[in-house]
Image (spheres, rainbow, N blue to C red):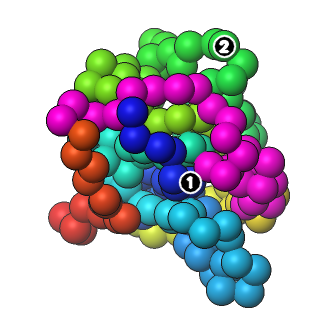
């Protein structure tokens, strides 16, 4: 088994689909703040389009992975900007999207996690932040309610890194990848269409 040596924060989404870009905005703000307040060594900040193969490459051999993604509920139950936190340490399984909940990605995060686990390439400890969005139409920029949630979310992620980062030894044990190889991927960004 290969040692967990990194922490990864992965913003999932599409910056050209309004609130679906919240994960990318969070990672961008973390990069800006890291220039003033350094993150622990081995911390990778990445933006990803949600492709399962790219996600697996980013979180493979991490002690801690934090994923930030937008979620979209039916308008009657949506509260844009509300953030939900899921931690694998809680013992609850990450579930696939229920009917009425929509993802802009072909396969969801739960499917990517199951695939990574099956391949022995899952993250150590996984924390997911799902931010309720209001608008996923074509365009750039977050809606005001989602934009207001970003600074607080960044502080929560910084606290998670400080408390549960790779150096803390926390997380669930996972076997290394078959053959002992390791792919270092620091950004998995899809070019604009």
Figure label count? 2
The residue at 50%/45% (across/down) is 4
Q: Marks 2/1: CA distance?
A: 20 Å
Does the magenta portion include 185?
no
> In the image, is 67 to the left or to the right of 143?
left
Q: Give the range drawn in magenta.
A: 153-179
Residue 91 is labelled as 2
Which quarter of the picture shows residue 120? top left
The residue at 68%/70% (across/down) is 39
Residue 116 x, y percent position in the rendering: 33, 29
Q: Mark 1 points at which residue?
A: 7
> In the image, is 169 to the left or to the right of 45?
right
Residue 18 visible, this angle: no
N-term mark: 2 or 1: 1
Find numbered disc 1 in the image and state the secondary structure of the residue it sits on: strand
**Whether residue 133 is situated above or below residue 158 in the rendered picture:** above
Which quarter of the picture shows residue 126? top right
Find numbered disc 2 in the image and state the secondary structure of the residue it sits on: loop
The residue at 45%/62% (across/down) is 46
């Amino acid at each position: 088994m290969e040692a967990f040596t990194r922490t990864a924060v992965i913003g999932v989404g599409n910056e050209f689909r309004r609130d679906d870009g919240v994960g990318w905005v969070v990672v961008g703000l973390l990069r800006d703040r890291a220039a003033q307040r350094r993150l622990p060594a081995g911390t990778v900040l990445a933006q990803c389009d949600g492709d399962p193969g790219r996600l697996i490459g980013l979180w493979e051999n991490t002690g801690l992975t934090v994923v930030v993604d937008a979620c979209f509920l039916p308008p009657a139950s949506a509260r844009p900007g509300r953030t939900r936190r899921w931690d694998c340490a809680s013992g609850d399984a990450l579930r696939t999207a229920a009917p009425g909940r929509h993802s802009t990605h072909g396969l969801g995060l739960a499917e990517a996690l199951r695939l990574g686990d099956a391949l022995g390439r899952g993250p150590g400890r996984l924390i997911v932040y799902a931010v309720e969005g209001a608008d996923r139409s074509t365009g750039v920029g977050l809606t005001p309610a989602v934009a207001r949630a970003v600074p607080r979310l960044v502080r929560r992620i910084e606290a998670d890194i400080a408390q549960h980062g790779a150096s803390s030894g926390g997380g669930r044990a996972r076997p290394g990848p078959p053959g002992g190889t390791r792919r270092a991927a620091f950004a998995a960004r899809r070019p604009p269409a």
